[in-house]
DNA sequence: TCATATAGGGATAAATTTATCCCCTATTGC
DNA sequence: GCAATAGGGGATAAATTTATCCCTATATGA
């Protein structure tokens, strides 16, 4: 994997949470896993804009950071299931707060984002 | 400014808030402005890891997205003050939620981030 | 026999974001 | 005159993240 050349700033809680949540699809992955979409193919269908590859990479980082856990069932064809760890579940209320704010201000956000 | 080639995904509140908060220093800028650090030089002192240039760029985007407003006092030497708009203030509780989670899990986060 | 589904990953290119460097304005204090 | 302070920004390089392309394996169904 890529090795950072510039060390991260880890001065406060905001910095720390940023380190584990930054990544284009990570928040959505956590959200959809929490909603019960546990298998990679389900997640890919839920997030069609992302490629398989990137989702795998981001899931791996979420796993390394202890937010999700992965179970590989030794069957053919392969079956893999992700789930939130307790640590990951503790993030859900925070993600709700983010999502709710986004939903509440949806029109306005859409208009400022699309310039 | 840079023109996107890949359109953003704007399917839900999480996507929308992501569009305005992604940016290495944006959340911290909002936070420090809310704490009363309104002038660019104060913000730069608060966030020494970031260069002047990047802070200016991210402040500009926050302004374009309607989260902060900028007042230029026509004096010499120049005096500029940023403040949160009502829209920006409505984000503060959400940022608190993020920061609190980060603070509560500080040790654990630090250890998983530093591998 | 060929396509599909399931899951994974290397190699490489492209996109995007940050960092660096250097220059500009005008005033006050040495 | 020179340095410092306050604030900005163009040009370009470097860092970082995503996207694309292609290849692996096995079983099932048409």
Image (tube, coloured by chain):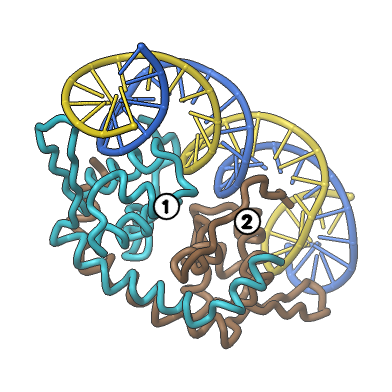
Chain colours: A cyan, B brown, C blue, D yellow
Give residue A30's quadrant in the image. bottom left
Q: Nearer the viewer, residue D14 or A41?
A: A41
How crowded pointer 2 is (Cα within 10 Å; few <14, some 14-19, many 20+) is rated as: some
Depth check, front residue: B66 or A114: A114
Indicate the secondary structure of the residue bearing disc 2.
helix
Q: Where is C13 relative to A11, above or below? A: above
Q: Which chain carries label 1?
A: A
Rendered location of residue B75, percent (x, y): 82, 78
Q: Quadrant of the C terminus of chain B?
A: top left
Q: Name the residue under label 2.
A: B52
Q: Is residue A25 visible?
A: yes
* Vertical comparison of C8 with A106: above or below: above
**Circle 1 sits on which residue?**
A47
* Residue B80 in the image, given as x and y percentages of width and height: 71, 75
Tag 1 secondary structure: loop
Q: Nearer the viewer, residue D3 or A87?
A: A87
Q: Residue at x 71, y 66 (%)?
A: A115
Q: How far apart are marks 1 and 2 (CA)?
A: 36 Å
Is residue B40 left or right of A81 when viewed as pictured?
right
For residue D20, what is the image quadrant? top right
Percent of width and height locating residue B19: 54, 62
| Residue B72: x %, y % from top left | 76, 77
Compared to residue B5, the image places residue A4 above or below, namely above
**Hey, which residue is sitting farthest bottom in the picture?**
B86
Q: Which residue is drawn at 37% across and 58% down?
A: A28
For residue A43, above or below residue A57? below
| Residue displayed at 37% across by 43% down | A55
Closest to the observer: B84 or B76?
B84
Q: Which residue: 54% across, 77% down?
A: A106
Label 1, residues with CA under 10 Å away: few <14, some 14-19, many ≥20: some
Q: Can residue B46 be seen in this view?
A: no
């Amino acid at each position: 994997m890529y090795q950072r050349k510039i060390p991260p700033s880890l001065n406060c809680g905001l910095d720390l949470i940023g380190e584990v949540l930054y990544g284009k699809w990570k928040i959505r992955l956590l959200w959809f896993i929490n909603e019960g979409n546990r298998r990679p193919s389900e997640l890919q269908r839920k997030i069609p804009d992302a490629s398989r590859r990137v989702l795998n990479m981001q899931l791996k980082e979420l796993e390394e950071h202890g937010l999700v856990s992965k179970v590989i069932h030794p069957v053919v064809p392969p079956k893999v299931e992700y789930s939130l760890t307790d640590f990951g579940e503790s993030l859900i209320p925070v993600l709700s707060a983010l999502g709710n704010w986004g939903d509440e201000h949806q029109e306005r956000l859409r208009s400022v984002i699309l310039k």
